[in-house]
Image (cartoon, helix red, strand yellow):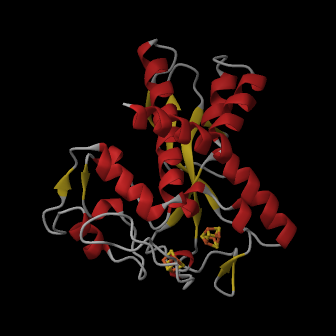
Amino acid sequence: MDENIGAKPPIKRFECNGCGKCCRNFGKDGFLPLWEWEVEEYEKLASEKGVMLQIEPEAVIHDRKSGLLFCLKYGMRFGMNNQPCLFLNENRCSIYENRSLACRVFPMAKTPYETHRIDDTNFGTCPALNVEKFFQAVGATREKGIKIKSQETARLFREFFVDNYDYCEQNEVITAVVKRTLSSLVYQKKVQPEEAQQPYDKQTQIYSFFEFLVKIGVCTNEEKIETVNTLKDHKLFFQMMKEREGLLSKD
Ligand code: SF4
Ligand code: SF4
């Protein structure tokens, strides 16, 4: 459905044409980023479908204090020849209701809150996305980008991308929670991180971030489950966004 979102000149709300390119081309050495709870979900779905995924920890960190290895995120690889995602079936995602946040965010890449400006880094490469028109609508040029000044610009993104925008914010909030938690632990000298030496063999135990927190006694397993359940809950997150917007619109 064509819809004027109120900007001048008017732009149309983004509509996916279902070409499936974003699930087929991850680029050389490309991977799909996954949170730890998404790894569990993907492995469960893969085993139900009888497919074998290649998922590896990304950015492994060695904690000098505990001697443990942990990672903040995972990446699903697509083989040497950049093969399509194994969940893609006739250009459709066969696990659509359970797809990862990275899949839900596309073709957005980053919110303007994250980048503090609008430029190409906010968008993924998608043939149905007319980035030029979007730039025109916010009064910017693609070459120069634009520094954002008002909440209106973020609202425009949200109007244009709808759910993709909300998922993008959720992803950025989770990233911020993980990074701030780690920084705080470093500040309190409970963790002493350093880049881990590669390569590790397959037997090396690398903990997911929240498992690591349990291992070093920062939280209990029950607290971990509660935190993860809150972070991954789309409905709860959307509700929080709506409440925030309600408050903002009263300002
Ligand atoms: S590349 Fe763009 S148009 Fe094609 S399936 Fe992905 S989001 Fe939709
Ligand atoms: S999980 Fe689904 S949406 Fe994500 S890359 Fe694979 S086929 Fe595409």
Image x and y of residue 152, in percent: 31, 49
Horizontal side, residue 102 vs residue 27: left or right: right
Residue 209 lies, with reference to residue 76, above or below; the image says above
- Corner quadrant of residue 242: top right
Residue at (86% x, 67% y) in the render: 48
Front residue (pair 129, 63)? 129
Horizontal side, residue 70 vs residue 86: left or right: left
Q: Which residue lies furthest to the front in this view?
A: 250
Front residue (pair 32, 12)? 12
Front residue (pair 16, 194)? 16
Horizontal side, residue 11 vs residue 66: left or right: left
Front residue (pair 65, 74)? 74
Residue at (49% x, 48% y) in the render: 198
Residue at (49% x, 19% y) in the render: 185
Residue 146 lies, with reference to residue 178, above or below; the image says below
Q: Which residue lies furthest to the right in this view?
A: 48
Residue 157 lies, with reference to residue 20, above or below; the image says above
- Corner quadrant of residue 97: bottom right
Horizontal side, residue 43 vs residue 81: left or right: right
How many numbered circles does the render carry? Answer: 0
Image x and y of residue 156, in percent: 35, 57
Image x and y of residue 158, in percent: 43, 55
Q: Residue furthest top?
A: 188
- Answer yes or no: is residue 71 visible: yes
Q: Quadrant of the C terminus?
A: top left
Image x and y of residue 15, in percent: 49, 76
- Answer yes or no: is residue 196 visible: no
